[in-house]
């Protein structure tokens, strides 16, 4: 475990700013996945700062609160949150108050405090996500959604921010240098079993690419990673940063990794800063449960 942690810490860390996809799967299928109505709470952020405008992602967790990454709000002078409406367009909600975790330090993302909140006076017209509070994330399949740059596992990021996509990856490792020591959830972007022209390394040794294997990329910061448990989909992670594990200076290609701030570790902070987070009603598609259980795989702990 010490060796694994050391390799992670020595890798180039870049904030996770939609994501990169398998080169052998049409982008239209990832876009369709992103349009699934159960991922509707994930929206796009256009923020303003003294340095200009930037894009991130976030997830509605109540009628008036959105959860995102601390580095998406800590220098913001304005925040607009865009959610898909019933007419197929987007409704913009203007944030009136936002906060990053008090211990967040942009120079030390491995500390595990990269979480932030945005409040809206206008009610968000979407069923909010449920927060995951248990500790069974490791070995689970994560459903990752966001807006942002994209590309594929062969070439990394090649296309701009602004399109919602979703895909899956395994939650393979937990670590943070501060807090409870497990405030970040890690995964890697694996190549297909029979089509790996770059010879990418399976860093966490969790097997070859899953159907709709996916890695967060620039613009996905703050987006949601969900897990399926007890016939419910829960928000378990907040996209924080990506790792150039293969050290080829290409971001989010096969062999690279990513980290998500762990919602269950930061639930107390989220709850205390929002006073209460109402839980939405159930009613998820039973068919997805079967798919997720089929894709779910376990791994050997270090």
Image (cartoon, grey):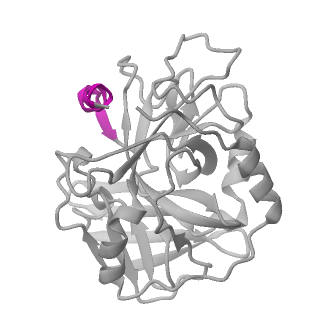
Q: List x then y, in percent, for residue 97.
A: 30, 80
Q: Nearer the viewer, residue 256 or 135?
A: 135
- Foreground: 184 or 136? 136
* Magenta stretch encompasses residue 3: yes
Question: Picture coordinates of residue 167 (x, y %)?
Answer: 63, 45
How many discs appear? 0
Image quadrant for the C terminus? top left
* Quarter of the rendering containing residue 128: bottom right
Magenta portion: prevailing SS class: helix
Q: Residue at x 62, y 49 (%)?
A: 165
Q: Quadrant of the N terminus?
A: top left
Residue at the image point whose x is 27% and y is 47% from the top: 176
Chain part drawn in magenta: 2-14
- Identify the residue at image location x=42%, y=56%: 56
Q: In the displayed structure, would residue 94 be above or below residue 139?
A: below
Determine which quarter of the picture holds residue 25: top right
């Amino acid at each position: 475990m010490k060796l694994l942690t050391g390799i992670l810490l020595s890798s180039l860390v870049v904030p996770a700013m939609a994501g990169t996809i398998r080169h052998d799967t049409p982008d239209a299928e990832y876009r369709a996945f992103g349009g699934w109505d159960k991922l509707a709470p994930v929206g796009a952020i256009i923020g303003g700062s003294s340095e200009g405008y930037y894009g991130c992602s976030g997830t509605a967790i109540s009628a008036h609160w959105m959860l995102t990454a601390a580095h998406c709000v800590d220098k913001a002078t304005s925040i607009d949150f865009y959610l898909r409406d019933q007419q197929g367009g987007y409704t913009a909600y203007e944030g009136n108050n936002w906060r990053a975790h008090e211990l967040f330090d942009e120079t030390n993302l491995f500390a595990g405090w990269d979480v932030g909140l945005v409040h809206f006076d206008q009610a968000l017209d979407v069923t909010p996500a449920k927060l995951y509070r248990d500790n069974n994330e490791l070995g689970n399949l994560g459903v990752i959604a966001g807006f942002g740059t994209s590309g594929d596992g062969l070439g990394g990021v090649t296309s701009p921010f602004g399109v919602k996509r979703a895909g899956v990856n395994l939650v393979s490792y937990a670590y943070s240098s501060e807090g409870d020591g497990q405030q970040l959830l890690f995964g890697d972007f694996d190549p297909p079993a029979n089509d790996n022209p770059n010879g990418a390394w399976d860093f966490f040794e969790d097997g070859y690419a899953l159907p709709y294997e996916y890695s967060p990329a620039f613009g996905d910061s703050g987006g949601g990673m969900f897990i399926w448990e007890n016939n419910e989909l829960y928000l378990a992670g907040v996209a924080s940063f990506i790792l150039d594990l293969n050290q080829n200076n290409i971001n989010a290609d096969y062999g690279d990794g990513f980290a998500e701030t762990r919602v269950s570790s930061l639930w107390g902070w989220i709850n205390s800063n929002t006073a209460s987070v109402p839980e939405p009603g159930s009613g998820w598609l039973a068919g997805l449960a079967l798919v997720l259980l089929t894709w779910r795989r376990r791994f050997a702990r270090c």
